Amino acid sequence: MSKGLIHHLEIYVSNLEDSKKFWGWLLEEIGYKPFQKWKNGQSWKLGDTYLVFVQTEERFLDIPYHRSRVGLNHLAFHVESRQQVDDLTMKLRARSVNILYQNKHPYAGGPNHYAVYFEDPDRIKVELVAPL
């Protein structure tokens, strides 16, 4: 294990079933494997890092997530190539996922940043970035 690398991220979600469908497919497309599963959560792992999605308790669902508030803004993942960005963009569109910044896609991050930006079921922004 490498010192300083993220061990895991735990994200509370408004609807675990919707999040499992969205994140399970996406994470497995980029190399993650299912890791742990229990009544109120599920995780996927790549190397020494894993992502955990947990159902938020009903009593905490009154204020929905928004990435412009204090807290997580977005998650960005490396992918293998520009072709993989293009392939995943087509698959996201086929799943009716909201692609962000479509007028600048795939260079919304700048001329040297080939990526696709989109939202998960709770509107958490996700970015898939190709190597330079």
Image (cartoon, helix red, strand yellow):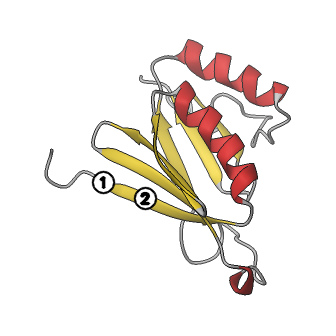
Residue located at (49% from left, 25% from top): 130
Name the amino acid type tagged 1. Answer: Ile
Query: Taking 58 as reference, is 55 left or right?
Result: left
In the image, residue 123 above or below residue 89: below
Q: What element carries label 1?
A: loop
Instruction: Estimate how packed mark 1 is, as few (under 14), some (14 to 19) or many (20 or more) residues with alpha carbons within 10 Å.
Output: few
Q: Nearer the viewer, residue 31 or 36?
A: 36
In the image, residue 55 above or below residue 51: below
Whether residue 85 appears in this view of the structure is yes
Name the amino acid type tagged 2. Answer: Leu
Q: Is mark 2 on a helix, strand or loop?
A: strand
Q: Nearer the viewer, residue 122 or 56?
A: 56
Tag count: 2
User: Is the C-beta separation of discs 2 and 1 under 8 Å?
Assistant: yes
Image quadrant holding the N terminus, namely top left
Res. 9 mark: 2
Image quadrant holding the C terminus, namely top left
For label 1, the residue is: 6
In the image, residue 87 above or below residue 115: above
Residue 94 x %, y %: 83, 25
Instruction: Estimate how packed mark 2 is, as few (under 14), some (14 to 19) or many (20 or more) residues with alpha carbons within 10 Å.
Output: few
Residue 29 x %, y %: 56, 25
Query: Taking 25 as reference, is 71 left or right?
Result: left
In the image, residue 68 above or below residue 57: above
Task: Identify the image quadrant of residue 111.
Answer: top right
Residue 44 x %, y %: 47, 43
Whether residue 114 appears in this view of the structure is no
Residue located at (70% from left, 42% from top): 22
Task: Identify the image quadrant of residue 100.
Answer: top right
